[in-house]
């Protein structure tokens, strides 16, 4: 299934709400950033384990591609929740901060290729 970012954001937001309600998790503005940091740490741990840069977990779990992907999904999901909680239009921000450079850099590359 392919979904737009907006559709995915809505679904992730709903899962986040259901999880917070089911586990009685109060979420204040700091919680979103702290949880994002926690998830980055978990992704880092899986990355290091998968690449032989960390000792295996005591229970033998982790260190698989699937575990890495699951942690990446957790980080992405928490990032989306952070964006939603802080009313950040990430598509507009990416366009403004990153994608505006495409035309300029592509033109520079073309100019270099033509002059060579």
Image (spheres, grey):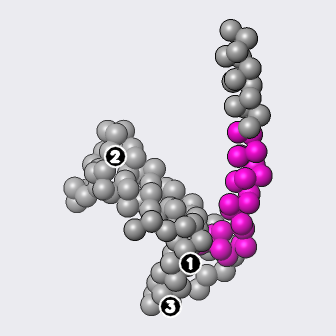
Q: Residues within 10 Å of mark 2 (few under 14, many from 20)?
A: some
Residue named by callout 3: 21
Residue labelled with disc 1: 10
Q: Residue at x 74, y 57 (%)?
A: 93
Quote the CA–CA distance across marks 1 and 2: 32 Å
Mark in the foreground, 1 or 2: 1
The residue closer to the viewer here, 24 or 110, is 110
User: Within 10 Å of the Cα at label 1, are there few (<14), some (14-19), or many (20+) other Cα atoms?
Assistant: some
In the rendered image, residue 16, in percent from the top left (x then y), is placed at 51, 80
Helix, strand or loop status at disc 3: helix
Q: Is residue 25 among what the camera can see?
A: no
User: Is residue 90 rendered magenta in the image?
Assistant: yes
SS class, disc 2: helix
Query: In the rendering, at what x and y percent does residue 5 appear?
Result: 57, 66
Spot occupied by residue 113 in the image (x, y as percentages of width and height): 67, 16
Q: Main secondary structure of the magenta part?
A: helix
Can residue 96 be seen by looking at this rendering?
yes
Classify mark 3: residues with Cα within 10 Å, few (<14), some (14-19) or many (20+).
Answer: few
Which residue is found at the position 49% from the left and 56% from the top? 41
Of callouts 3 and 2, which one flags the residue occurring earlier in the amino acid sequence? 3
The secondary element bearing badge 1 is classed as helix
Magenta segment: 81-102
Q: Which mark is residue 49?
A: 2
**Residue depicted at 41% across the width and 51% down the height:** 45
Q: Nearer the viewer, mark 1 or mark 3?
A: 1
Residue 104 pos. (x, y %) = 77, 34
Indicate the quadrant containing the N terminus: top left, top right, bottom left or bottom right: bottom left
Report how far apart the C-alphas of labels 1 and 3 lie in the structure. 17 Å
Q: Quadrant of residue 2?
A: bottom left
- Extreme front residue here? 114
Residue 31 part of the magenta segment:
no
Q: Quadrant of residue 66?
A: bottom left
């Amino acid at each position: 299934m392919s979904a737009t970012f907006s559709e995915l954001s809505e679904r992730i937001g709903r899962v986040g709400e259901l999880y917070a309600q089911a586990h009685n998790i109060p979420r204040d503005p700091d919680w979103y950033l702290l949880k994002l940091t926690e998830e980055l740490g978990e992704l880092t741990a899986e990355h290091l384990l998968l690449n032989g840069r960390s000792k295996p977990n005591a229970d033998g779990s982790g260190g698989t591609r699937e575990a890495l992907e699951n942690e990446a999904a957790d980080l992405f999901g928490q990032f989306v929740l952070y964006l939603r909680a802080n009313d950040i239009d990430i598509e507009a921000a990416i366009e403004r901060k990153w994608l505006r450079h495409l035309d300029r850099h592509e033109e520079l590359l073309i100019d270099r290729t033509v002059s060579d």
